[in-house]
Image: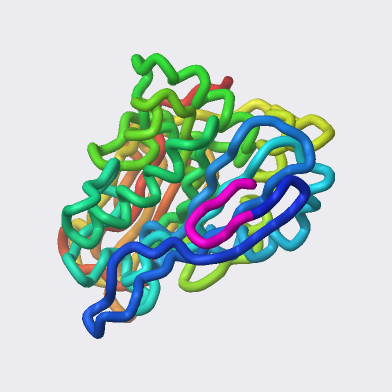
Amino acid sequence: MTSLGTATAAPGEIATGRMHVGETRDGSAVGLPVAVVNGREDGKTLYVQAVSDGDELNGAGVLTRLVPTLDPDAISGTILLVGIVNYHGFQVAEHRNPIDDTKLNRAYPGEEAGTTSERLAAATFAAASRADLVLDLHQGSTSRMIDETRIRCGTRHRLHEACLELAKAFGCGHVLDQKGPDGQLARAAPDEGIPTIDPELGGAVGWDEGSIQVGVEGVRNVLRHYGFLDGTAPMETQTRASGFDQYGAPAGGLVHFEPDLGERVAAGDHLFSVTDVFGTVKERVSVDSDGIFWRTRRLPQVATGEYVCSVGTTIDSY
């Protein structure tokens, strides 16, 4: 028998339940939705979580489509899943946890007796620590972004190569290989010896079906590559960036992008212009370094200095 919260599954079974982590302001229990897929045969353990940022919902979309298709009789090993980590942010569709105004994916490995976010991080980190591999499903918040996978442990980390392999197995096509901020699960779990990646499944308000399908196939690729399911993952060459150039608005007005997301850009190419409401160009911004047009704001209106877009830089393949 394998348990996560109140979900308990024997070999060859799937069970769902709740992981109780404290109480809300009215005294009712905070119960994160959890599932256990216990394969018929022994094997590795995979931990998957979604919605640690409360407005990043594509990961939940992946799980709603993936889990009903899993046959535990055909699986070797165990899959542990937490469908919504940022319980409080999810309820009000906010990125941060509104109870303590914290970005939850900066709170790992957490603290059992700490703040609300630290307790959520501690409970989910304890679950992740039981696994051999970790997938922390994200998206580019409500920005527009390409589908990509992030490796956050840093290139000198002892698990860097293992994280690269996991990202290649997932197979988004693009990888950001850049050491992340303290408190990210994808930084904390490798320190415990667990290869971990942070798939960023596009960006959307609500669900984006295209990016969700990328995520479903990505998890299935991981299951095949590491022996949970029969078959092999494509292990296609990934385009890797190791940095970002971020661009702000040099003037207020409306933004017009010239390249499409995912396009290669070269230093000196026109990236975007800012016009007034009647279409008169006020400023035009060019690319500083060769790279890939990676991410943009969703709304066209900007104030002077406001974030506009990002270009992934230092590009190679592996």
The way the protein has been coloured in the rendering is rainbow
Who is closer to the viewer here, 206 or 272? 206
Q: Which residues are magenta?
A: 1-8
Q: Is residue 275 visible?
A: yes
Magenta-span inclusion, residue 198 = no
Image coordinates of residue 294 in percent, x first then y, are 45, 46
Q: How many marks?
A: 0
In the rendered view, tell whether residue 159 sits above or below residue 291. Answer: above
Q: Residue at x 39, y 72 (%)?
A: 90
- For image coordinates 57% across by 48% down, the residue present is 80
Q: Residue at x 33, y 70 (%)?
A: 89
- Where residue 311 appears, as percent x and y from the top left, is 39, 42
Q: Who is closer to the viewer here, 87 or 26? A: 26
Image quadrant assignment for residue 95: bottom left
Residue farthest toward the bottom in the current orientation of the protein: 26
* Image quadrant in which the C terminus is located: top right
Res 274 quadrant in image: bottom left
User: In terms of depth relative to the viewer, which is nearer, 182 or 143?
Assistant: 182
Residue 42 in the image: x percent, y percent?
72, 32
Using residue 237 as the reference point, say whether residue 314 is left or right of it: left
Q: Main secondary structure of the magenta part?
A: strand
- Rendered view: 60 above or below 154: below
Q: Nearer the viewer, residue 240 or 99?
A: 99
Residue 207 picture location, percent across and down: 55, 69
Q: Is residue 193 above or below residue 138?
A: above
Task: Please say whether residue 291 is visible from this viewpoint.
Answer: no
> On the picture, is 120 further left or further right than 58?
left
Left or right: 237, with 33 as reference point: right
At 65% from the left edge and 60% from the top edge, which residue is drawn? 15
